[in-house]
C-alpha cells in the first residue's frame, strides 16, 4: 500500500502555545534546545506550514553564536552577538519559546536598555566551511580589533590607548 504524503499549506502566522504571541515569516525567534538547561537557539522564520494532520512546522534560517562556529569565539565577540548562517532547517512550531530582536551592531549599541531578547549580528556564517563574512570590519585602534559592545572601555594591549 502506498504511503500518503501529508498535504502542506502555508500559514501567514502562528500563535505560540500558552501565549498570545503571534509570529510571522521574517520574525526572529527563540527555539527550545533539546537539552533543558541550555540557552535557546535563535532563528529567523522563513515559512510557516500546516499539514493535513494539523502539525505546524516552521522553516528557519539559523543564527549561530560565535562559540558554536568553526572558528570559535574571539576576544571582540560580544555575549549577545550572533552570526546569520546559510543553514536552513524545518522545526516543529511547538519548539518556539518566543520572539527576539536581532539588531545591527550600530542599532544595538544605541539601545538605551538592551533586554534579554535583544541580540546583534554583523557577520554572516557559511556553516559548511566555517567562513565568516565580511572578512574585515571596522577596527578601533592600531591593534586592529573590532568593537565589542560588552566592553565599554578597553585598553589596547599594543598601543595602551583606551
Image: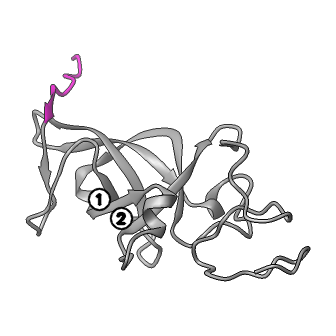
Circle 2: is it few (<14), some (14-19), or many (20+) Cα within 10 Å? some
Q: How is the image coloured?
A: one colour
111 in the magenta segment? no
Q: Is residue 30 above or below residue 132?
A: below
Q: Are marks 2 and 1 in contact (CB under 8 Å)?
A: yes
Residue wearing tag 2: 32
At x 85% / y 65%, what residue is drawn? Answer: 143
Q: Is residue 155 above or below residue 63?
A: below
Q: Which residue reaches farthest top?
A: 2
* Res 35 → quadrant: bottom left
Where residue 162 appears, as percent x and y from the top left, is 75, 81
- What span is colored magenta in the figure? 1-11
Which quarter of the rendered picture does the N terminus lie within?
top left
4 in the magenta segment? yes
At x 72% / y 81%, what residue is drawn? Answer: 154
Mark carried by residue 36: none
Decide if residue 19 is on the left or right side of residue 128.
left
Decide if residue 10 is on the left or right side of residue 47.
left
Where residue 96 appears, as percent x and y from the top left, is 27, 59
Residue wearing tag 1: 95
At x 61% / y 81%, what residue is drawn? Answer: 152
Amino acid at each position: 500500500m502506498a504511503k500518503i504524503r501529508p498535504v502542506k499549506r502555508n500559514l501567514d502566522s502562528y500563535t505560540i502555545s500558552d501565549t498570545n504571541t503571534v509570529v510571522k515569516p521574517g520574525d526572529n525567534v527563540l527555539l527550545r534546545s533539546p537539552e533543558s538547561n541550555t540557552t535557546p537557539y535563535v532563528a529567523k522564520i522563513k515559512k510557516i506550514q500546516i499539514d493535513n494532520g494539523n502539525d505546524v512546522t516552521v522553516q528557519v534560517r539559523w543564527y549561530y553564536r560565535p562559540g558554536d562556529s568553526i572558528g570559535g569565539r574571539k576576544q571582540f565577540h560580544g555575549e549577545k552577538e550572533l552570526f546569520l548562517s546559510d543553514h536552513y532547517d524545518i522545526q516543529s512550531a511547538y519548539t518556539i519559546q518566543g520572539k527576539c530582536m536581532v539588531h545591527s551592531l550600530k542599532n544595538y549599541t544605541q539601545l538605551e536598555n538592551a533586554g534579554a531578547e535583544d541580540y546583534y549580528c554583523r557577520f554572516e556564517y557559511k556553516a559548511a566551511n566555517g567562513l565568516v563574512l565580511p572578512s574585515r570590519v571596522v577596527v578601533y585602534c592600531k591593534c586592529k580589533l573590532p568593537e565589542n559592545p560588552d566592553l565599554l572601555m578597553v585598553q589596547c594591549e599594543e598601543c595602551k590607548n583606551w
